[in-house]
Image: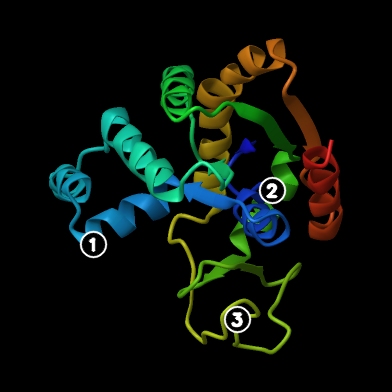
């Protein structure tokens, strides 16, 4: 099956995507990760993206579409996709439908993680990730079982996003409400939208997602 995880930055999409991969054998397609990997590998689309990024410009929807198309081709039809961070706009939602149709796929679920803005500020300003595999952690809510060692891959390198501060978080929330939330009515018309309390514990959110995916 193919699904979209929606929610503002910091809602926990990345953490849950890793868990869905582990529980259901699906593959997370994060546009940011795909871009970095393509640039590092020097693929044709990666070189195209690098040229744009080196100019300080935003990568176009066309380039992102090429990345997704290439990833779906490499994955094959037997592996389900988790779209994390894409689509962000109505135009991207339409493009994604076309790409999936080309590969004989369709969206099965769109899952929105609903959050409280003030609580989200606290969540984001304390988060950090493994520098090797990207597993997410938090100073208060989710620390590694062994201090300084990633639970997922054993790395001891961690990093924080420099823009994880209150002003930026509230700006991101505004962008999500104005640009991404409007794509939901189209998916609701198809009857594929489910909403989950994204402020619940990680385990409770995972359980709720597992329940949706097992329908």
On screen, residue 36 above or below 194: below
The CA span between labels 1 and 2 is 35 Å
Q: Residues within 10 Å of mark 1 (few under 14, many from 20)?
A: few
Q: Earlier in the sequence, mark 1 or mark 2?
A: 1
Q: Earlier in the sequence, mark 1 or mark 3?
A: 1
Q: Residue 40, position in %: x, y? A: 24, 63
Q: Residues within 10 Å of mark 3 (few under 14, many from 20)?
A: many
- The residue that label 3 is drawn on is 150
On screen, residue 158 above or below 19: below
- Which quadrant of the view contains residue 48? top left
Q: Tell me if I can see residue 193 in this picture.
A: yes
Q: Earlier in the sequence, mark 2 or mark 3?
A: 2
Front label number (1 vs 3): 1
- The residue that label 2 is drawn on is 120
> Residue at horizontal 49%, vertical 30%?
87
Looking at the rendered structure, which numbered label has been put on residue 41? 1
> Residue at horizontal 33%, vertical 37%?
64
């Amino acid at each position: 099956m193919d699904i979209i995880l929606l929610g503002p930055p910091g809602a926990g999409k990345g953490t849950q995507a890793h868990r869905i991969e582990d529980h259901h054998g699906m593959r997370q397609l994060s546009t940011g990760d795909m871009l970095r990997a393509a640039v590092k590998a020097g693929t044709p689309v990666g070189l195209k993206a690098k040229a744009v990024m080196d100019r300080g410009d935003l990568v176009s929807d066309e380039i992102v579409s090429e990345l997704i198309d290439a990833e779906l081709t490499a994955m094959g039809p037997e592996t389900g996709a988790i779209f994390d961070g894409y689509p962000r706009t109505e135009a991207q939602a339409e493009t994604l439908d076309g790409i999936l149709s080309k590969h004989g796929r369709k969206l099965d679920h769109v899952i929105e993680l609903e959050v409280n803005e003030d609580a989200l500020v606290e969540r984001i300003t304390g988060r950090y990730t493994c520098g090797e595999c990207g597993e997410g952690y938090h100073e208060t809510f989710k620390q590694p079982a062994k201090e300084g060692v990633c639970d997922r891959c054993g790395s001891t390198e961690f990093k924080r996003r420099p823009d994880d501060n209150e002003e930026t978080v509230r700006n991101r929330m505004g962008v999500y409400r104005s640009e991404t939330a409007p794509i939901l009515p189209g998916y609701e018309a198809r009857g594929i939208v489910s909403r989950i309390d994204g402020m619940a514990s990680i385990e409770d959110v995972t359980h709720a997602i597992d329940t949706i995916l097992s329908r």
